[in-house]
Amino acid sequence: MADKKVILVTGGSGLVGHGIRAAMEKEGKREDEEWNFVSSKDADLQDLASTEALFEKYKPTHVIHLAALVGGLYRNLKYNLDFFKINSQINDNVLSTAHKYKVKKVVSCLSTCIFPDKTTYPIDETMVHNGPPHDSNFGYSFSKRMIDVQNKGYHLQHGCNYTSVIPTNVFGPHDNFNLEDGHVLPGLIRKVFDSQASGTPFVIWGTGSPRRQFIYSLDLGRLFIWVMREYNEVTPIILSVGEEDEISIKEAADLVVEAVGFKGEVVQDTTKSDGQFKKTASNAKLRKYLPDFKFTPIKQAIKETCDWYAANADKVRK
């Protein structure tokens, strides 16, 4: 088939990669698409020669670039320089190699943390470069912003169709449930299960007041497939539930407690940092393209994630 798409997904063994895989299996694979999910075991994307060898092996026509050094608030605070240098190297290697191998389209994954710390809400795609990001993760944030800069450069200078998506807080099966460097929702899930097993109080770090828009990894997977197939703007697109679906960390913790059936004591450790209070994002651009897209209700998505963790705790606990 002359126009067959060969899709290479970097970082394919992570949370979002598994979400894309699950979404694709649920809706059925297309005959004109060959999907290849690769991880750090397949190539060291910090190394240009290794990156080029990966592209030589699979000869992709399309790339979904998910690979990154990631971590939660506390790990970012400790290693901002590492996050900047390593991610910048990975991103530059992937995009330059995609250009060398004449890849037709690249979709890279950004994050809402790239937006300015001091801003008006809701944030939208036009505001990415309007001011510095929050100090807590400036290294990661600037490395991700530079993907947007490179996408524009490759388009203007070489006519490349490279774009990016900006998901809000992703969670779901195959998440990182490590307490030191995981994100907020998998961290809450891990702590509730640990507290239930040990008979100790469930401790929520911080005041619980910061607000987040959480997107289920299976929903994000469906949207990634749509972007790869249909979205042709170079400028980023925010992939998120609506502003009305934003909830506080405390509300998220309550949903986890309910999903697990935890009956113990719940306490808050307000000596811990809250991080950014909110990063409310507009999904108006997404809704312009997909007005009828249905997101999984947050309560159902958290319950499914808790059930997955319960079934896989021995494998994912670190």
Image (cartoon, helix red, strand yellow):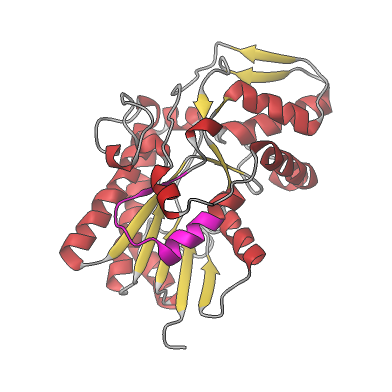
Measured along the vertical axis of the image, is residue 208 above or below residue 303?
above
Residue lying at the far left of the rendered structure: 157
Q: Is residue 261 visible?
A: yes
Residue 202: x percent and y percent?
72, 20
Residue 318: x percent and y percent?
67, 39
Residue lying at the far top of the rendered structure: 271
Residue 228 part of the magenta-drawn span: yes
Q: In the drawing, does residue 226 fall left or right of residue 250?
A: left
Q: Residue at horizontal 28%, vertical 72%?
A: 100
Q: In the drawing, does residue 1 fall left or right of residue 96?
A: right
Q: Residue at horizontal 69%, vertical 36%?
A: 299
Q: In the drawing, does residue 205 fall left or right of residue 46?
A: right
Measured along the vertical axis of the image, is residue 41 above or below residue 85?
below
Q: Which residues are magenta?
A: 222-239
Residue 49: x percent and y percent?
35, 67
Picture quadrant where residue 127 is located: top left
In this orientation, which residue lies closer to the viewer: 106 or 219? Answer: 219
